[in-house]
Amino acid sequence: MDKILIHGGHPLSGSIKVSGSKNSSLPILAATLLTREPCVVYGVPDLSDTHYMLQILMHLGAQVERASGTVSVTAEKIQSVAPYDVVRRMRASVCVLGPLLGRCKEATVSLPGGCVIGDRPIDLHLQGFEALGAAVRVESGDIKVFAPKLTGAVINMHGKFGPTVLGTDNVMMAAVLADGVTVIEGAAQEPEVVDLATFLNKMGAKIEGAGTRRIIIEGVPALHGAEHRVIPDRIEAGTFLVAGAIAGKEVTVKRVNPEHVRAVTDALTRCGLAINVKDDAISILPNGHASALDLTTEPYPGFPTDMQAQMCALLSTSKGTSSVTENVFPQRYMHVAELKRMGAQVELEGATAVIDGVDCLLGAPVMASDLRASAALVLAGLKADGITEVSRVYHIDRGYEHLDEKLSELGAHIERVKAA
């Protein structure tokens, strides 16, 4: 099992290019199951999660070819059963349910299991399928859905902590082949949902309103093959911007949609950091310690929960007292204990982290608990005195394409080593 060692105190400078979006790639790859014809997806990042998704597609019978960031999928003949051994490694594997139900009118997919960042139920997914006319059963750890035919309906995707992104994706993929019109109310507005809708429309779907709270889908008899390039990964972009804020002289993040990361750049500006935006590039120019900040995570276009841990790392050495309230996944604070091992002063009050900025952090052995927490620990290590040793970096490999190599290009002293 690999570890990442970060020798802190080395300033970052230069530019990096953002990879394709993980959270776009996974449902878009799943959507290739909706047609017998070949599909080509460009810009798919080299991640363990995308590898797992391709393994699921191949298990279901699709022919898959991958060359660098280009993936070709032909799902001419597929089966509709994805057992636990295939889906257990990745919660997002549940997004094959929608396309399998849409095309095969039935699907059996094993429940993907729990998640360290808190309860993430798929009840809304299943309620959406039922509204389309499917019978749903959960037995022996498997989700089984069946429908002689799917019929358009009005479906609400707004849950306890906001709209469900994967639920919106799943219902949208099932509904494109349903009879009649489906209206998704309370839909997730994330750019990744818009990207999926764009790909589905290229395949011949009729979807309007993606990116708003109301998506209208007119069902069609069949979809055809298509080519598509996934959008840049806004969370990777935000992570590198925060890296620049923590340890940078001047860092430029290229191949980014500035609108997609506006909540992050707004937060950094409120911390007193200088941000320059030009076309598809954003530069951050730190000017001393960042200022304290009160921050609340919200569904898009609010501040993303996937950037909360990284901002906690930044605010740990900001002047004054900051507060971070997690409104999307209130239990998502596994990184706090590890940051405290590095000298951070953080106290949890329910779903709020109160952070008293310290002058410096100290390198220490720390353990990654989830994807974004692991990135936060790496960023903290860039600022810390001494060596920070991050274990369980397979979490990082789920969602960041060669994070250590990209940080090295910016001047970080970082290395990946085999654990003893």
Image (spheres, rainbow, N blue to C red):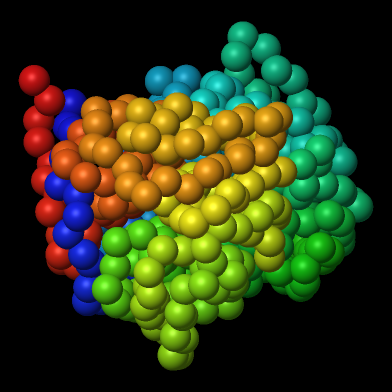
User: Observer-nearest residue: 316 or 320?
Assistant: 320
Residue at x 80% of width, y 28% of height: 135
Relative to 367, does residue 273 appear above or below in the rendering?
below
Tell which of 138 and 385 is nearer to you: 385
Rendering coords of residue 417 (x, y %): 9, 36
Between residue 213 and residue 142, name the one nearer to us. 213
- The quarter of the image holding the C terminus is top left
In the image: residue 156, left or right of residue 250: right
- Position of residue 271 in the picture relative to residue 283 (left or right): right
| Residue 27 vertical placement versus 265 (above, below) | above
Does residue 123 appear in this view? yes
Q: Is residue 10 left or right of residue 83?
A: left
Name the residue located 47 percent from the left edge and 73 percent from the top edge.
Answer: 273
Q: What residue is rendered at 71% in x and 69% in y?
A: 211
Quarter of the view holding residue 394 = top left
Q: Is residue 58 visible?
A: no
Q: Is residue 113 above or below residue 211?
A: above
Q: Quadrant of the N terminus?
A: top left
Q: Is residue 257 left or right of residue 132?
A: left
Q: What x and y, as percent, mark residue 400?
A: 33, 51
Q: Residue at x 61, y 31 (%)?
A: 348
Q: Is residue 144 above or below residue 325?
A: above
The furthest residue to the bottom: 278
Residue 182 x %, y %: 84, 57
